[in-house]
């Protein structure tokens, strides 16, 4: 309960990029490179969500077929 209250009222700022990425992307001249890094992050983020969705759909289909046979 205490930790839940702490998470609601206290905000911790963090930087999501590693030191190398941040150093490579600082500056105005690197906009194309920054967009490429952001696209890569989105690509890496989508794959786990797709896997979970596919597994969830397969489990749903298995349970639906099992209830039909009974």
Image: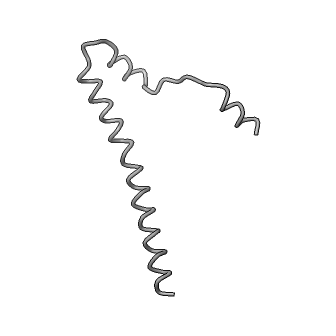
Q: Position of residue 45 (x, y in %)?
A: 39, 42
Q: Nearer the viewer, residue 10 or 29?
A: 10
Q: Is residue 50 above or below residue 41?
A: below
Q: Position of residue 49 (x, y in %)?
A: 41, 50
Quadrant hosting residue 42: top left
Q: Total marks drawn? A: 0
- Residue 8 vs residue 53: left or right? right
What residue do we see at 70% from left, 30% from top?
Answer: 6
Q: Position of residue 47 (x, y in %)?
A: 36, 48
What residue do we see at 31% from left, 29% from top?
Answer: 37
Q: Which residue is farthest bottom? A: 70
Question: In the rendered image, which quarter contains the N terminus?
Answer: top right
Q: Nearer the viewer, residue 23 or 3?
A: 3
Q: Is residue 47 above or below residue 3?
A: below
What residue do we see at 39% from left, 60% from top?
Answer: 54
What residue do we see at 47% from left, 87% from top?
Answer: 69
Quadrant hosting residue 33: top left
Colouring convention used in this rendered image of the protein: one colour
Q: Is residue 12 above or below residue 29?
A: below
Q: Position of residue 58 (x, y in %)?
A: 42, 67
- Residue 50 vs residue 14: left or right? left
Q: Which residue is farthest right? A: 2
């Amino acid at each position: 309960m205490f930790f839940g209250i702490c998470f609601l009222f206290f905000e911790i700022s963090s930087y999501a990029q590693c030191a190398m990425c941040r150093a490579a992307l600082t500056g105005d001249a690197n906009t194309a490179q920054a967009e490429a890094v952001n696209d890569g992050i989105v690509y890496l983020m989508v794959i786990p969500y797709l896997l979970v969705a596919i597994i969830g759909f397969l489990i749903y289909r298995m349970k639906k077929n099992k209830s039909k046979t009974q």
